[in-house]
Amino acid sequence: MRKPSIPSTLLIPSPLSRAKTPGCRVWRLLSLSALCAAGAASAQMTPVGTWRSVDENGQPKAQVRIEAHGEGANATLTGRIEKVLKAGADPKAVCDKCEGAKKDKPVAGLEIISGAKKKEGADVWEGGRILDPEKGSDYSLRLTPIEGGAKLQVRGAIGPFARTQTWQRVH
């Protein structure tokens, strides 16, 4: 005696068979893309990267690359001027107002950020120094990524006097 067959349209697919359908592949791909995007967004909440610094009028001043040295809580940041962007600036300018080892060094390539460390429990890096090569002045430093890491608040201070600039990430 032959068993009656059930039409395939009436069968309930098992979870294993569903995983092989094109619709499920699309959902898995979308889920994986969302996870990667979330990871990339959180990875951008760091000062590490290339930034366009601006002057008081919002005009491009320099392109600065910030790098991390070390791992985890002991990592410190340094930042160097890659390019001078200020209109009319001499690309071969030197830091004639700087003191010590940085005196008369080319501005392009000059380390202007040093020693900043991530504050525990916050997306803030502080404790470092920032140099203004135009004035030769050295300031205490605080770096705070904002707007999902697209911008960086750079705060330099001497005692109670401080100034904050907002730099833009270069992609």
Image (cartoon, grey):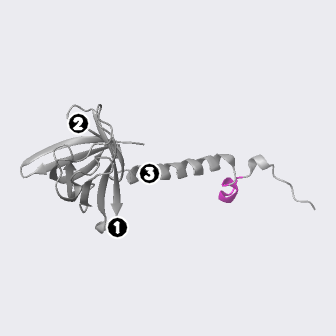
Marking on residue 10: none
Q: Which residue is mark 2?
A: 55
Please name which of the two marks, 3 or 2, marks the residue nearer to the observer. Answer: 2
The magenta segment = 12-19
Amino acid, disc 2: Asp
Viewer-side residue, 5 vs 30:
30
Q: Which residue is mark 3?
A: 40
Quarter placement of the C terminus: top left
Of the image marks 1 and 3, the number of the one nearer the N terminus? 3
Query: Disc 2 versus disc 1: distance between alpha carbons?
Result: 31 Å
Q: Is residue 84 left or right of residue 162?
A: right
Q: Is residue 36 left or right of residue 83?
A: right
Whether the magenta-drawn stretch holds residue 17 is answered as yes
Q: Which residue is mark 1?
A: 70
Amino acid, disc 1: Gly
Return the x and y of residue 49 as percentages of the image width and height.
37, 50
Of the image marks 3 and 2, the number of the one nearer the N terminus? 3
